[in-house]
Every structure is written in C-alpha cells, then in structure tokens.
Image (cartoon, grey):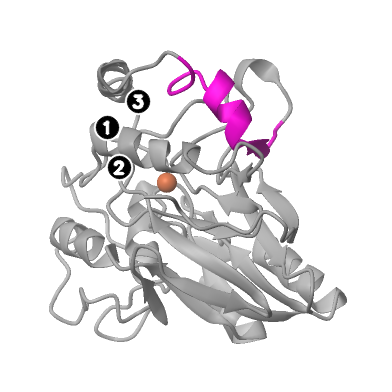
Amino acid sequence: MTIPVNMDLVPEVSGYFDEATNTISYIVRDPSSNHCAVIDSVMDIDYAAGRLTYDHADNLIAEIESKGLTLDWIIETHVHADHLSAAPYIQQKLGGKIGVGSKIMVVQETFGKIFNEGTEFQRDGSQFDKLFEDGDTYMIGNMEARAIETPGHTPACMVHIMGNAAFVGDTLFMPDGGSARADFPGGDAGVLYDSIQKVLSLPDEMRLFMCHDYGPNGRDIQWETTVGEEKKHNIHVGEGKTREDFIKFRTERDATLAVPKLIIPSLQVNMRAGTVPRDEKGNPVLKVPINGL
Ligand SMILES: [Fe+2]
C-alpha cells in the first residue's frame, strides 16, 4: 500500500538536542499559518536525587512563545524508555492535544503488570487526548499530518508524516547509527524490519528526522537525513541487507546492550502521558520493581 504524501508542502522544522539523553525534540510549523506541533519533548530528571526540572521544555516553550505560534499538538512517537516526556508541562503552559499510537494500551497492559500498578492505573490510553490508528490524519493549522504504525521497537511506535518531513521516532537512526533495539517487552526485530521498509517506501527525497543520535565514531550529532540516504547507506537495513540478516544481527546485538539508565522512571511516567504517579496521600513517587524488568 502506498502511503499518501504531499512533497510540495515543506514544514519548518527546528530540532532541539537534549545532551543528557541524546534525544531530539522538534517544533514543526505549518508554513502557511502560525500553528505548530511539538514532537517528543523531554522533562529533565536527576534520578539519583529524585528531582524533576524543566530546562529543556522551557526552552521549547520560549521558542514557541517568541515566534507567536499556536501549539496544536504534542506528539509522542512512542513510550520512550530513555527519557521522560514533558507533554503535560508544555500543555499546561501552551495548550495543545497530547497524542500517541492506540497500541499504547498494549504497552500499558505490559508495564502495568511489571510495575504492579493497581486498578487506578487505566490501561485504556485515557491519559492521552488522542490515540492514533494507522493512517489517521490530523491538522496542524492548514497542514495535514498523518500517523503511520511502525511497531517493532515497541508496539505503540508511530511515524508522523507532515508534508515532506517524517518524524521516525525510534524506527531508524542516522545511516551510520542503524536502527533501535527491538528487545523491550513487546518488541520484535522482524516486525521492526517490516516497519522500517514502510518508512523506506516513502519518496527518496522525504526528509527524515531522528528521535535519537549518539554521534557514532566521534562524529558531531546529526538528526536529519532522507529516505534515499537511508536506503543506500543505513548500516543495518541499507542496500543488500535482508530481513534474515537484520533479525540475526539485531537479536545478537540486543543481547549485549545494557538496560537504559532511565527506563524505570521513563516507563512509569510516559505510559501515563508524562504524568508522575502518586501514592495514596497524593505525593508524586516512582517505584523500582526488583528483578521485574
Ligand atoms: Fe525509544
């Protein structure tokens, strides 16, 4: 199936790199209005101290305010395991709807069990304003955006396409970075390969914006490439790499990777759309399940 695109529509994209987690957050602006979306925001955490701060999010907010933009959407490409979302903090200051893939319910079911959440934790995605189904469209000002299901890294991963720009979340990294791991609960290397092929079926000139970059081999941080570049040069899925190659490589590699440093706070907060859970007295607290992950 061909994914409908409008390559003549060129949104203004600004990336903001978070050094603590190697995450790139984006402000995407409709070229024909003052409306914008934020993609994959970051809330700062000092996990050792149990302290949350908002420098990265405040910077995004200041950018949006200084340009006089209206924030329509706050998008999560998936439930991140390596950083905390600042979506509710940004929403409180600027408005906008928080959206994620509808398979969030699968993620909530899985991690609801691992974190031994009680019945007050809803597993129906109701913490989010919008749950996207595959192919759903939504508007940022006059610009149509489209959400495409791309599971494999996690069940709820989606790629968001806006004109000639696609925000790939953790399906792909820069060509020299390859792809994201597929060994989290609900992840699957073969499914990830198929999702990546969906992204690579977009036009060669489609601009791709990464959610992460780690500057492999000492190069400077980068976050923008194209479908054509990924097809030619991606070290995990580029020319000549088969599905079988990918599954074998990904599975072996994932077995060597350490658990992400912030997975425990990230999942508890992000599966609640960026809200910190509270104890019976209403105090914000995080759990550490022992041998649960
Ligand atoms: Fe991720």
Spatial CA distance of label 1 from label 3 is 14 Å
Residue 39 visible? The answer is: yes
Residue displayed at 70% across by 35% down: 222
Please state if 12 lies on the left or on the right of 80 as rendered: right
Q: Earlier in the sequence, mark 1 or mark 2?
A: 2
Spatial CA distance of label 1 from label 2 is 6 Å
In the rendered image, residue 63, in percent from the top left (x then y), is placed at: 80, 68
| Segment tinted magenta in the rendering | 221-239
**Residue 35's disc number:** none
- Do the residues bearing badges 1 and 2 touch, measured as CB atoms within 8 Å? yes
- Residue 230 magenta-drawn? yes
In the rendered image, residue 41, in percent from the top left (x then y), is placed at: 58, 61
Tell me: residue 180, above or below residue 125.
above
- Do the residues bearing badges 1 and 3 touch, measured as CB atoms within 8 Å? no
Tell me: residue 252, above or below residue 231.
above
- Residue 214 magenta-drawn? no
Q: Mark 1 highlights which residue?
A: 189
Q: Nearer the viewer, mark 2 or mark 3?
A: 2
Residue displayed at 33% across by 68% down: 133
- Do the residues bearing badges 2 and 3 touch, measured as CB atoms within 8 Å? no
Residue displayed at 18% across by 47% down: 290
Please state if 49 lies on the left or on the right of 198 as rendered: right
Q: Mark 3 highlights which residue?
A: 257
Spatial CA distance of label 2 from label 3 is 17 Å
Label 1 sits on what residue type? Answer: Ala
Using the image as rendered, state which of residue 21 and residue 29 is in the foreground.
29
**Residue 152's disc number:** 2
